[in-house]
Image (tube, helix red, strand yellow):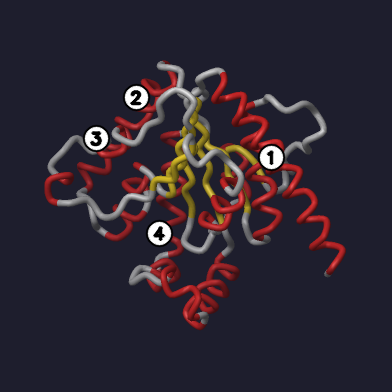
Amino acid sequence: MGKKSDAYDDELEQLQLAMVQTQAWTIEHGLRVVIVLEGRDTAGKDGAIKRLTEYMSPRQTRVVALPKPSDRESSQWYFQRYVAHLPAAGETVIFNRSWYNRAGVEPVMGFCTPAQYAQFMADTPRFERMLTDDGIVLIKLWLDISREEQALRLKERRKDPLKKFKLSSLDAEAEARFDAYSDARDRMLAETDRDFAPWTIVATDDKKTARLNIIRHILAVLDHVPGEVKKPDPDIVFGAEEARKRLAR
C-alpha cells in the first residue's frame, strides 16, 4: 500500500509541475481555456479539481459551481449565466457542472420541460461551435462510475461528518434513477460530441488513477510540456464512441 501511495504522490507532483509550466505558457500566449467537468454524483469531480488546481495561478484560475438559477436567471437565455464566467486572455475556467445540467439532472428530475430539453440539445453544438471558433480551448470531461461503487461512496458520504457539505437531497435519486441517468448520458454524448468539442470519458472507480489521468488528458490537449509526461491510460480515458461499448448501464 505504501509503495502504491508513494507512486501516486510522485506522479501527481510531476503532473502538477507540468500543469504549472503549461499554465504559465497559456498565460504568456493569452490562451482562454474552459474545462467542463461533468459526471455522476460521487464520481470525484471535487477531488479532481482540488488536485488539478492546487498549484495553478489563483489569479488566472477560476472554479465555477453555480447554484440553482434565480427566477430572473430562469427567464434568461439558458446559456446567459454561463457566458458571464467565460475566460479572458490567459485565464482558465473550470466549470464544476455546467450548462450540461440540462442534459442530465434537469430532464431526469423533471426540472425542465421536454421542449426546453430538446432546444438545449439543438442549441449546444451551435453554442460550443461559437466558443471554439472564437479561439476558446474547450475540454469536456464526463466522469463515470459503476453502480456498485457509487452506492458504496454514497453510503460512506452519509456516515462521514466531514462530508456534510457533500450531502444532497438528490443523493438517493442518483441511486434510484441510475438507469435514467445512463440514458440521459448516452443521449448527451450522441448529440453533443463534435470534432470541435469532443467528449472525453474518465472511468473513476479508482479515484487516484482517475485524477492522474484527468490531469494527463488536460496536459495532452494543451500539448505544451514535452514527452516525459505519461499519456492518458486508454482503459481509463476514452472517447464517446468507445463509451457506447463500455459504460455502466
Residue type at mark 2 is: Arg
Camera-near label (2 vs 3) is 3
Camera-near label (1 vs 4) is 1
Write down the quadrant of residue 222 in the picture.
top right
Q: Which mark is residue 60?
A: none
- Image location (x, y in percent) of residue 248: 57, 57
Secondary structure of the residue carrying numbered label 3 = helix
Q: Earlier in the sequence, mark 3 or mark 4?
A: 3
Q: Which residue is mark 2?
A: 126
Q: Which one is nearer the viewer's eye here, 131 or 249?
A: 131
Residue type at mark 4 is: Ala
Secondary structure of the residue carrying numbered label 1 = helix
Distance (Cα) linking label 1 and label 3:
31 Å
Q: Residue at x 63, y 45 (%)?
A: 214
Distance (Cα) linking label 3 and label 4:
27 Å
Mark 1 surroundings: few (<14), some (14-19) or many (≥20) residues within 10 A: many
Residue type at mark 3 is: Gln
Q: Are marks 2 and 3 in contact (CB under 8 Å)?
A: no
Left/right placement of residue 94 relative to residue 118 reads right
Q: Which mark is residue 180?
A: 4
Camera-near label (3 vs 4) is 3
User: How many numbered discs sit on the rendered protein?
Assistant: 4
Residue type at mark 1 is: Arg
Q: Which one is nearer the viewer's eye here, 25 or 230?
A: 25
Q: Earlier in the sequence, mark 1 or mark 3?
A: 3
Left/right placement of residue 133 relative to residue 114 reads right
Q: Earlier in the sequence, mark 2 or mark 3?
A: 3
Q: Which residue is mark 3?
A: 80
- Image location (x, y in percent) of residue 98: 38, 44
Q: Is residue 102 above or below residue 230?
A: below
- Image location (x, y in percent) of residue 9: 76, 56
Distance (Cα) linking label 2 and label 4:
26 Å
